[in-house]
Amino acid sequence: PHPIGSRLVFEFLVGSRRRPVQGSGEVTWIRAKYEGPGKPAGMGISFGDLDEGSRDHLTQALFEYLEESVGGDLPALPDAAEPAASGS
């Protein structure tokens, strides 16, 4: 991993459709080894610049992940409220 505070340019693929995410950011943490749940080895990057396409790809991948993870357990969303009937 790069040292904390390092600026870098990155590119990776996300989601089942393997869409690209490109941008720049700054290293915010590093870990030499796994330290337990939520604390993987590697480095964390705070995204700085992401183009609109990359933001869309991240959003789509996140929704895909959430649907696969908890989608079956989520209650159905109510339909949009119908306009109130006029009392004429």
Image: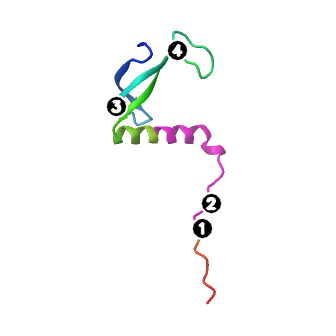
Q: Amino acid at mark 3?
A: Gln
For image coordinates 58% across by 74% down, the residue present is 83
Q: Do tag 2 and tag 1 residues touch (Cβ < 8 Å)?
A: yes
Q: Position of residue 84 (x, y in %)?
A: 61, 77
Q: Amino acid at mark 4?
A: Ala
Q: Secondary structure at mark 2?
A: loop
Question: Which is more N-terminal, label 3 or label 4?
Answer: 3
For image coordinates 39% across by 33% down, the residue present is 18
What residue is disc 4 on?
Answer: 41
- Distance from disc 2 to disc 3, alpha carbons, whole Å, reads 36 Å
Q: Do tag 2 and tag 3 residues touch (Cβ < 8 Å)?
A: no
Q: Do tag 4 and tag 3 residues touch (Cβ < 8 Å)?
A: no
Q: Is 79 covered by the magenta stretch?
A: yes
Q: Position of residue 8 (x, y in %)?
A: 35, 21
Say above or below: 75 vs 78: above
Q: Secondary structure at mark 4?
A: loop
Q: Amino acid at mark 2?
A: Pro
What residue is disc 2 on?
Answer: 78
Q: Nearer the viewer, residue 63 or 28?
A: 28
**Range of the magenta residues?**
61-80
Q: Residues within 10 Å of mark 1 (few under 14, many from 20)?
A: few
Q: Secondary structure at mark 3?
A: strand
What residue is disc 3 on?
Answer: 22
**Which part of the image, by quadrant, shows the N terminus?**
top left
- Distance from disc 4 to disc 3, alpha carbons, whole Å, reads 22 Å
Question: Which is more N-terminal, label 1 or label 3?
Answer: 3
